Amino acid sequence: MAKYKVEVDLKTCISTAACYATDSQHFKLCKNQQANVIGGETDESKSTHVFEDDQIANAQEGAKSCPVSAIKVTQL
Ligand code: SF4
């Protein structure tokens, strides 16, 4: 089981929907069409959450799908 942090930089996100189309376990659409991390804390600049499960590969796929590299997945 991996413990990892998923972070979306909302100053960089350009609302393409690629991440939550690729990985709906970690990412969701929020009101302004940007992506939020599911279950996470969100302010005007970022959305972040720490997960502890076997799904890190999916989060990494979601991060790779982002055309502006707004998503960071860090193993803890
Ligand atoms: S893929 Fe990147 S730019 Fe597109 S909604 Fe997700 S974080 Fe934003």
Image (tube, rainbow, N blue to C red):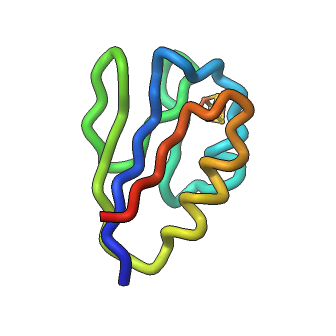
Specify the quarter for ligand 1: top right
Dividing the picture into quadrants, the one containing residue 52 is bottom left
Residue at 58% from the left image edge and 55% from the top image edge = 24
Residue 17 drawn at (x, y percent): 69, 34
Q: Left or right of 61: which side holds 54?
A: left
Residue at 46% from the left image edge and 52% from the top image edge = 73
Question: Which of the pair 31/7 is nearer the observer?
Answer: 7
Residue 68 drawn at (x, y percent): 67, 27
Residue 10 drawn at (x, y percent): 46, 22
Q: Left or right of 4: which side holds 58?
A: right
Residue at 45% from the left image edge and 27% from the top image edge = 9
Q: Is residue 13 above or below residue 54?
A: above
Question: Which of the pair 60/39 is nearer the observer?
Answer: 60
Residue at 52% from the left image edge and 47% from the top image edge = 27
Q: Quadrant of the N terminus?
A: bottom left
Question: Which of the pair 57/15 is nearer the observer?
Answer: 57
